[in-house]
Amino acid sequence: MYEAFISGYRLADVSHGKPYHVYCIEVLESKTGARYLVEKRYSEFSALHRKLKKDNSDIAPFPPKRVRNSQPKVLEQRRVALELYIQKMLSLLATKQQVLNFLGIESQEAAFHQRIHKATDHSTHNHPNTLGHHPVLTFHCDPYVLADSTSSLSDVVTNGVLLGIYKS
């Protein structure tokens, strides 16, 4: 079983032409635990919808194209609608394989190798409009508890706190 989430969107860097937004899709395969990260444009989703509509009668509603489609509010509404759309299409047996092909993922039944966009390196995307997981910074020891005693600078913060507590 596959689960799909659109975690955010970003403005694609293009060397020529007009910049465009891509939606960052995360697909989880529950059988193997595989995780895929794929980026697609709205126009690619629209092409998938036209293809699915031609081949099938029972498909989910598709979010319409709007004027001012680069506004954050519009992009977020479209992200939510596209996420619902892709989840619905993955849940239907008639459209599941076409959606997996669209995402560049081969199902277990189709093949066990040549997986595209498999995210085993846990690479991160910068999505300015979403909350995400960030790397944790750790220290071997607490730099404030074991301060550098060789430093000629006094610990202004610690001295200030101690002064505030004991001199009041």
Image (cartoon, rainbow, N blue to C red):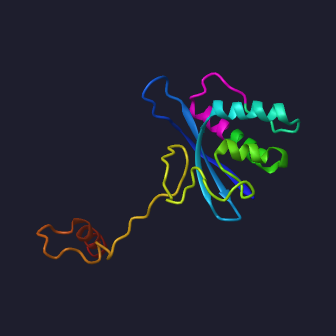
User: Residue 111: x percent and y percent?
Assistant: 69, 56
**Residue 62 in sight:** no
**Residue 23 in sight:** yes
Which residue is at the front of the view, 73 or 19? 19
**129 relative to 77 in the view: left or right:** left
Q: Residue at x 51, y 45 (%)?
A: 127
Instruction: Please provide the residue range marked out in magenta.
Output: 64-79
**161 relative to 75 in the view: left or right:** left
Q: Quadrant of the C terminus?
A: bottom left
The quadrant holding residue 71 is: top right
The quadrant holding residue 158 is: bottom left
Q: Is residue 74 magenta?
A: yes
User: Residue 82: x percent and y percent?
Assistant: 70, 39
Q: Is residue 5 magenta?
A: no
Q: Residue at x 60, y 23 (%)?
A: 68
Q: Residue furthest right?
A: 57
Which residue is at the front of the view, 85 or 153? 85
Please say if 66 is above or below 119: above
Please say if 122 is above or below 20: below
Q: Quadrant of the N terminus?
A: bottom right
Q: Residue at x 42, y 28 (%)?
A: 15
Please say if 151 is above or below 14: below
User: Residue 10: x percent and y percent?
Assistant: 52, 39
